[in-house]
Amino acid sequence: MTIPFEILRVKDWVVEAGNIALSYYQTQLTKKVKDDYSPVTIADESVEHFLINKIRQTYKNSPNYGIIAEETGGDWQNKQYVWAIDPIDGTRVFINGLPLWCISVGLLKNGETYRGVIYLPVIGDIYYTDDDGTAFWNNRPLKGLICNKWDRDSFIGVSSGAHRYFDIDFKRLRALGAISTHHVYVASGIAVAALHRKASLWDLAGAHAILKAAGGEAVYLDGTPLTFSEILANEERTCKGPVLAGHPEVINKLLTKIVVKDI
């Protein structure tokens, strides 16, 4: 069995996963702290378990796929297709009871992003690539929405600690709490760009497929393109440095306005 990306099926998965997450949202959660000091809760674990089971049940007769997930790892080596899962991107804002966390499911093909779905359960927004790779925001095509310039009201999506690590010559910066949310807001023209200091494969896989389909790209601050095969080969599955996402014309201009602090 091949691994087609059937968007109706995957959308059903993430919506059901969103309902699981919402059952824990704005409740008294006990959080654990991982080795990298990031938090994890029963909500993350429950959503990830649900999504992994759906993928395994669907493709149980195919040897051609692997899974890599934030909380449980996976088996993806030497697989043509790899499902990348971030059960709750933005766990900190989820714990705080804020709304812009999301569920991310991405599919890599031959080591690069291929398809993706990002779902924000609290506000009901879903971003996705369809079976042909066209990007949508709810039922609206994303083509033509990404910003190729900025004005005085434009903003860059950043992490909450960006001021500690970067000097950014840009008027408006907003920390919305989830890398995938920043990415799809760039794809839809809500944000002009997104700057991620430290990102992992599961943070980016689904959203990058959508961004790429919408006409965007992601690069390191030296201008080198982001490649997911390189991240897969990295033992930590993390980017080798800060990543800037946006329209190619925007990126070229912004790279001169971002300086990494020597701390």
Image: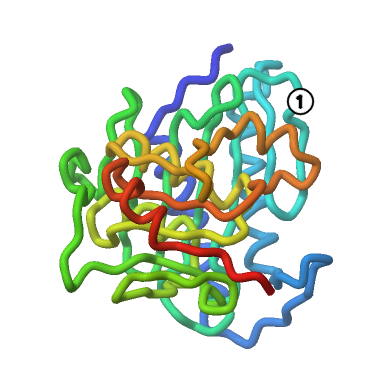
Which residue: 33% across, 70% down?
A: 170
For this view, does 195 lie left or right of residue 46? Answer: left
Q: Quadrant of residue 237?
A: top right
For residue 64, above or below residue 43: above
Which residue: 68% across, 48% down?
A: 238
- In the rendering, at what x and y percent does residue 256 appear? 39, 56
Label 1 packing within 10 angstroms: few (<14), some (14-19), many (20+) = some
For this view, does 121 lie left or right of residue 222? Answer: left
For residue 61, above or below residue 193: above
Q: Is residue 22 visible?
A: no
Q: In terms of depth relative to the viewer, which is nearer, 243 or 95?
A: 243
For this view, does 172 lie left or right of residue 48? Answer: left
For residue 66, above or below residue 126: above
- In the rendering, at what x and y percent does residue 247 appear? 29, 45
**Quadrant into which the C terminus falls:** bottom right
Q: In terms of depth relative to the viewer, which is nearer, 77 or 243?
A: 243
Q: Which residue is mark 1?
A: 77
Which residue: 62% across, 52% down?
A: 241
Count every numbered label the image shows and give the total. Answer: 1
**Quadrant into which the N terminus falls:** top right
For residue 101, above or below residue 211: below
